[in-house]
Image (spheres, rainbow, N blue to C red):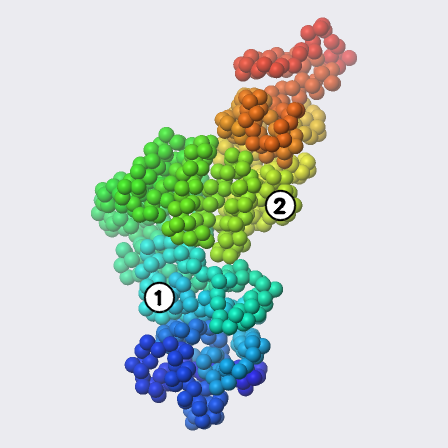
Amino acid sequence: MDASTRTPNPRGLTLSFFKHFVNLHGGRDAFQGITTKQVCHLFVIPYTEATKLSLVDHIERNDSDGRIYVRRATWFVSHAWNYLFLDVIDALDFFMDEHDLKNEKDSAGLWFCLFNNNQHDIKVLPFQHWFTTFKTALTAIGNVVMVFCPWNNPTTLTRTWCVFEVFVAIECNARFEVAMTRMEKAAFLEHVKRGGVFASMLAKINSANSSTRFPSDRAHIFDLIQEGPGFQWLDRMVFTAMETWVVRTVETQVALSSTPADHLQWLLIEGEISYTKGTYGDAEAIFQSAADIHEGIVALDNRPPHHWRAIMYLAVAKQVQHHARETWEPLFADALAHQEKLLGLSHEHILETMRWFGEAYCNIKEHTLGMPLLYRCHVTATQHGRSEDKALAALTLGRTLTYQMRHLEAQIWLEKAFDAFKTAFCENHVQTNYAGVDLARCYALQGRFVSASELLETIYQSQLRILGPEAYATLVVLRDLSVSLCNQGKYEKLERHLFQCHDGFLALKSEGWVLDCQRALGILYLCMRDYARANIALDATYAKFKVVFGPASTPTRITVYYRLFVAMESVEDVDSIEKIALLESLVVDANLQHETWTEHPCHGCFHTIQGTLYMCPSCPRYSLRYCQNCVYDRNTMCSHAPTEWIRLMPPARFLHHTRLALLSKTAMWNAYATSFHAYQEYSNLHEVRERIDDLLSGGERKDTADI
């Protein structure tokens, strides 16, 4: 083993020596266009021929300035041998400048395999030697800097030995950083301004696809990685480092902006990053700062296009947090009007505003206002837009059609969008995954839970690798997957997964999703017949939903329905008039005192169910539901063909029946008579055919109150 790897504190050569070495051999002109591999054969091996040592040992023993250049290694440099040697030097130089390490260019040793390994005997040594060499050095140093070139698809992550270095960094909990040249960073910043750059970069990086010169080396390294953290976590470390670098870079650009236009543009990018991460409150604050830049300085009609894009995104951030309509609707309208005046009718920013504005209306069930905007957006994108604009228009249309229970129409649009994103980007691209999630939800709403789960599982594994387990988008997919598995009766691990989602959204301060997960837990407990815990979860969810969305909103109504489903199964929930009255108050507040299952369409015809709701006794509980016509016509997703069905009355009628049964059981006939009259009025109003008989019709009965 080389001497430098045997020491507790590995040595390396300073960055100043790298530059000195170039000057010794003809200066930068002599190194133009030469790779690190070529430098090895053209310069390093000849330079150390007399001693046949590594360059580190050679300099330390034979150079009068050895003590100046050979220092304790503080950074392990991960690079690719086909990189241009000058690019590696420039990337390390720029890295030290950016990290305020300028003084260390002369004092910090860099462990660089070209210089640290003995290039004279490199071909005769086995895998185990190099495995030990790299691992020992990296573990002792504790800091890894990986050279990225090109920035959006670095060669280092296509080389198995470099992947191994990342693996060791994970194993020893080393600091991991990324270095690129000033020119590469400039190219990166230009692409950042166009949007979506980070997602594109993440989609291209996949360490499991790396290769090496000797297949046996690759096999050995892959075995080690798969037995350890796995490739998914390996990529996550790289992505985390890249994300940190991107955020830091954007924040720096915001701080360094010298003009209002630049400041506005970089604030928009910073806000988009926060929005994508699901930190909507932070995003709103950033977009508000961007919108305020021209306030009081430039007249309204003279403000630049990016100002109106900031106004639009401010509206988006407000709407997604369920702020009142009057806080975001005027912002959307103002932004769209000014964008059309400044940019024409087909600019990508106008298409973007129409998509967000139209969907915002549909989110509050103002479909007559939202859908025309979305159809107009699609037509314009088809005629004038980029392929990405067309796919986004189709995706938004499909998603909003699912809100309206037009699932078959929605499926056409969503499959079209999903295929378009796979073609335009790739299967692992974040935007492709977003489209896949919407498509999976559409499948689930049709009762196609297996198809939904298969798609969601694939997306979840991709999101874990690309975004990590705590990312907003990953948590959303895990939540959807858990609900889909619940609908298949696969309850194992679901409680743990839903708590993971709940806690993750709580950390992100995403209250709506926190409550959604709490409700999903309540539904899971109901399906598992754990009624006490179901009620705790559902009651807590209802209390918050009622405040946030209102008592008759869709989220609140769904919670009320499931609370009543518990009562339909749990006798203890309706064993007193007081308990029945409490449940009835929920129904009244939610405006559900009728025969329509407003939030439970039939899985056969997708129409709203009127009257009795039917469920197959052999299917997982509360998964598939049907109207009477579909049951009679056998238009069902279920293959069990039951002769007897589970029949559920609408909540209001169920409570009438339950009250009458309890009053008759306790012989409270005066109250019974009053309640039966109310039941008759309800049945007449809603044309209920299946009615119970009046137990008082045969004559007077003694009321317990009179005894």
Mark 2 touching mark 1, by CB under 8 A?
Answer: no
Is residue 537 in view from this perspective? no
Which residue is farthest right?
707
Residue depicted at 75% across the width and 10% down the height: 702
The amino acid on which the numbered mark 2 sits, given as a three-letter code, is Leu
Q: From the viewer's perspective, tell me whether residue 604 is left or right of residue 246.
A: right
How crowded pointer 2 is (Cα within 10 Å; few <14, some 14-19, many 20+) is rated as many
Mark 2 vs mark 1, CA separation in Å: 43 Å
Which residue is at the far top? 699
Seen at 66% across and 21% down, the residue is 658
- Residue most toward the front? 215
x and y, in percent, of residue 204 in the image? 43, 59
User: Which residue was labeled with disc 1?
Assistant: 185
Q: Is residue 471 above or below residue 480?
A: below
Mark with earlier residue (2, 1): 1
395 or 105, which lies in front?
395
Q: Identify the residue at horizontal 39%, vertical 68% (top origin).
A: 149
546 left or right, relative to 424: right
Which quadrant would residue 333 be assigned to in this image? top left
**Residue 166 % position (x, y):** 51, 68
| Residue visible at 50% across and 29% down in the picture | 606
Q: What's under tag 1, amino acid-wise?
A: Lys
In-image side of 634 versus 191 (left or right) = right
State the quadrant of the C terminus: top right
The numbered dot on residue 494 is 2
Can residue 435 be seen in this snapshot? Answer: yes
The answer to which quarter of the image holds residue 351 is: top left
Q: Which mark is residue 590?
A: none
